[in-house]
Image (cartoon, rainbow, N blue to C red):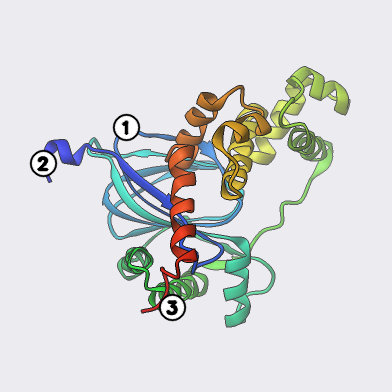
Amino acid sequence: MGTDEGRREWARHWQYPQLPGLDLLRAHYVRHTFPRHAHDGYVIAAVTGGVEEIGLPGHSVRAGPGSVVLINPEVPHSARAGVPEGWAYATLYPSRDLIVEVADEIGTLRGTPGFTADMVADLQGARAITEIHRAAEAGNALAADTLLRGLVVRMLTRHAGPLPSRTVQGAGGAEAAAARAVLQERMADPPSLEQLAAELGTSPFALLRAFRERYGMPPHTWLTDARVRRACRLLDAGTPPAEAAVTVGFTDQPHLNRHFTRIVGVPPGAYRRERAVESRRRDRGCGGGG
């Protein structure tokens, strides 16, 4: 790969209709950095080139080729290139329902499963992730679904246990949870930190500290992430990006574009187009079979 090609960034974030409950991302990033954010579901990623540096609560990891990165729902994390040439990876974003369904089938875990490792050296697992992408891109639903379930079983049996419950401890934890609920409800027109603290009967500094401890990021960062996640759901439902931007509280579509691209890895227009393309293929009867 030449220097220009090696520094070219590209990404595809999409859904294969024959694999419900799963988002897929293949990308090569060099300058792009993901700010601290979290996901509703799980992350299972195979680094295929370069090095990805992932910031997790209390530590960071460097993942190179043959590594599988495992992140549980609602765990705040960031990502950036760990070497000048960036990193390439294939990522699966399975929903909670999909992981629980497979866990119930194998019957070895009680409750909601959670990964107990954030990165493992697993060349076979990494290859399986790329093969799932290839099968989905080729429209081979039988192979993609078979490989996906086999991979999830592999990760759950080797690197999972019960997902720790996010219990609210003490007054600070309760206030942080209450603040989060207020921000979710009033996402389009949120209060200031001072107003939010006054409503909850605490001080701004105490609320900020409790929120950081509970959710791994300050309220304004969490709110931006939550807005982008809700925008994803609106775009999935066919809402135009400009309308989604206003609905979730961004001032305009460029504001949404900037934050959405930083957190999701592709612009909202590209994100929505991929879903529309796959939907049309499904309606024409394509995308299945072996």
Q: Position of residue 11 (x, y in %)?
A: 35, 45
Q: Residue furthest front?
A: 284
Q: Residue at x 79, y 45 (%)?
A: 169
Question: In terms of secondary structure, where does tag 1 sit?
Answer: loop
Return the residue at label 1: 31
Q: Earlier in the sequence, mark 2 or mark 1?
A: 2
Q: Amino acid at mark 2?
A: Gly
Q: Which of disc 3 and disc 1 is earlier in sequence?
A: 1
Amino acid type for the residue under numbered disc 3 = Thr
Q: Which residue is mark 3?
A: 146
Answer few, some or many: residues within 10 Å of disc 2's Cα (few below 14, many 20 plus, some between 14 and 19): few
For residue 153, the mark is none
| Residue 24 left/right relative to 108 | left
Query: Position of 114 compared to 11: left or right?
Result: right
Q: Residue at x 74, y 25 (%)?
A: 189
| Mark 3 or mark 2: whose residue is earlier in sequence | 2
Q: Do callouts 3 and 2 mark residues in contact (Cβ within 8 Å)?
A: no
Q: Nearer the viewer, residue 166 or 266?
A: 266
* Residue 84 in view (yes/no): yes
Label 1 and label 3: CA atoms lie apart by: 35 Å
In this image, 204 relative to 59: left or right? Answer: right
Q: Would you place residue 193 above or below residue 264 in this image?
A: above
Name the secondary structure under disc 2. Answer: loop
Comparing 277 with 28, the one in front is 277
Query: Exactly how many numbered labels are in the figure?
Result: 3
Residue at mark 2: 2
Q: Can you give x and y, in whole percent of width and height, for residue 271 in the image?
A: 46, 45
